[in-house]
Amino acid sequence: MSQDESQPILQASLHDLRYFTTLLRGVHFPNIGVQRAVIKVTEKGLVVIVEEARSLLGTSYIFADVFNEWNYHPDISSNDQEQENEEQTPLQEQFHTIAFEIPLSTLIECLNIFGTAGGFGSTKSANKVRLRRTGEDSDDNNDDDANRSTGRSSRSTGRTLEHFFGGSDRTTSMRMTYIGPGYPLTLIIAEDSAGPTTTCEISTSDSEEHLDLPFDNDQMVLRIILKSSWLRDALSELDPSCEKITFIGNPPVVPDSNATAKQKMKARLEGKPIFRLEATGTFGSTEMDYPDDKEVLESFECVQPVRFSYRLALIARAARALQSSIKTSLRIDNEGLLSLQFLMPSPTSRHNARADNATSNFIEYRCLAIDED
Amino acid sequence: MRFRTLVDNIPTFFRVIQSIEKLQKRCYIKFTETNMQIICNHDSNEGGIQVWSQIKVSSLFSDYRIQSTANNEIIMRVSPEALVSALRSAAPNVTGSGGTGGNVGSIETDEVIMKLAKKNDQAVLSFEIKGFSGSGRRVRLTQDVRVDVEKIEALKLNEPMCPEPDIRDIVSPPLVKLRTIVDRMKGMADFLTFRANHSGHMKLEISSDMVRVETEWKSLSAPNMNNLASQDQDQETEKDPDKFFSVVVSIRSFLKFLSSHVISSTTIACICQNHCLILYVYIGDVADAGGVLTYYVPAIIEDD
């Protein structure tokens, strides 16, 4: 068979690449050089998987409806030897998965080539350029203006969507193509039709076996759902020099129905905290208790007293995803495996351009507990 | 040897010096009766990038007086960094690159005099800054920048010799935008390929084992295509307008050139294939330029 004649396995496009970049940044660990990620492609979307130190697994689920255009054509008819194994597994029949490995840091840098990918923690210079750009936009007397209006008319669909988005910023669009194994992931990025176009070819490699940390809900001992900001504020209080962070959970005390309000208060103060974060470092230790209050912990399930410690440096990797998320689901199983699921804001919630059946994108981190003997 | 002038256009002077600040520790400044010439030609600066500039006296200075035994020319070696900080106190409101915004609460400048003086047996370029403090009081501030006055003949300064450019005079996109893009590329490769053709296309490309990134601009103007001398034009028309010419340069050198984005004016690029990239950064409008900074970025010759 010849690859060139067949359709590319994946072809997707975006009018505004910012949201997509945010979902990728959630699993990107800056300052560690080139970070590799496994990308799995299915009919439903992309799954981006990263790992660190064989004990932290980060996964970003990016559903197909994030993209304005999503064409996935798995090469099922292929007799490729590499793919044979996959096809024979019955599980693969329903959703044919293609996986490859890429340098994630490079992908993100490429998306931000014009300094327009936005998001948290973009470099200082990028922010500055963004400021300058908005400044340019406000004084509409430069000759660039003529070009821009032509750009607007020729890409009317993109522009109308952008009006829904409500931002005065010009958006950067992107088209992504993956022909198949052995081919690079190609991105074509354009700021507007009058401006420059950037073509990026990021080399891909076969995905190697990555860390797998299955979470068994039957073994779950602690489950908390809370607003991300409550967790974010707590984690940001911790001194980064701390080695480890301990999650402590206790089953809530069922208040005596006959007790007075005062007694209830007293019982609450004396009782064990239902959820506590503890970190010890060179300069002291920090303890933070969450109150047994639906306002704070939307849901709290704890079957037995739980106490597990994790390396803070690993937990801190989740900070960026936590930052951009709305809600967090925190689970711990009886072996101490921690699962943090961050619900990302939906790209459509604010602008309801495509409100129907949008799936929520989320980022999950799983982390093994430190063995404490 | 006498040299004294009023500095009228502090912001431009500041930005010009700022854009060469990162290039090398010491540069030459030559003052003649009509021009100020800044020369950065040090071999030791990384990548061998050179800057030769001509700035009209009238675009920066007034009441300009110069006398010397060497044809009324004075050349001095100076640290651009020191010059930038001296000028910054004279121009608190200049917003430059790198977040060096104005110092809040500094003086409002009334008059700036630059002169060559001798203090404690050391030649200095002395800036006398007169102005008003925030509370309206008169302030006088003097900033001395140490300089070494040199003998012109002894220096043997020669502008780089370049062959006839293969691509001449393509108008570069705004340098601020280029800088954002090249900043991203910097992390991915060490060398940058700069390509252009005669029909206004320009491409910047990097490639490594991991990634190939190419940014392309179309329909950039190339002014000289129209107003070249006629014999040149005949030659031009014979050339294929779509043929690309390229030069490979060090990304870090190219970024040093891009710090001239603070001048934010027209920039024109020329390619001498396998030799160098020449960039003219105009001060003010091209037609009525108050001066031009010429950057020579040497080609990296890849050995295959």
Image (spheres, coloured by chain):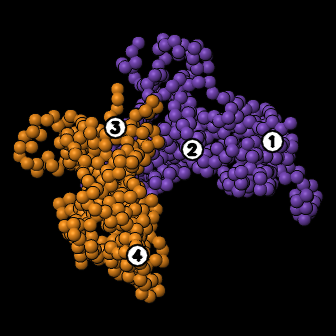
Q: From the viewer's perspective, is the residue at label 1 or at label 2 nearer?
A: 2
Q: Is residue A84 above or below residue B231?
A: above
Residue at (24% x, 63% y) in the render = B55
Q: Are marks 3 and 1 on the same chain?
A: no
Rendering colour (chain B): orange
A18 left or right, relative to B151: right
Q: From the viewer's perspective, is the residue at label 4 or at label 1 nearer?
A: 4
Q: CA distance from mark 3 to mark 2?
A: 31 Å
Residue A7 or residue B150, whichever sits in front:
B150
For badge 4, the amino acid type reads Lys
Parent chain of label 1: A
Q: CA distance from mark 1 to mark 2?
A: 27 Å
Q: CA distance from mark 4 to mark 3?
A: 45 Å
Residue A112 in picture, x, y percent from top left: 45, 45
Please say if the residues under marks 1 and 2 sit with CB atoms less than 8 Å apart.
no
Q: From the viewer's perspective, is the residue at label 4 or at label 3 nearer?
A: 4
Q: Is residue A270 above or below residue B144?
A: above
For badge 2, the amino acid type reads Pro
Q: Which one of the lettered chains is coloured purple?
A: A
B182 left or right, relative to B286: right
Which disc number belongs to residue A256? none
User: Element at badge 1?
Assistant: strand
Residue at (40% x, 18% y) in the render = A3
Which disc number belongs to residue B300? 3
For badge 1, the amino acid type reads Phe
Residue that numbered label 4 is attached to:
B119
- Mark 1, Cα crowd under 10 Å, few <14 / some 14-19 / many 20+, is many
Q: Are marks 2 and 4 on the same chain?
A: no
Residue at (42% x, 80% y) in the render = B141
Residue B120 or residue B243, whichever sits in front:
B120
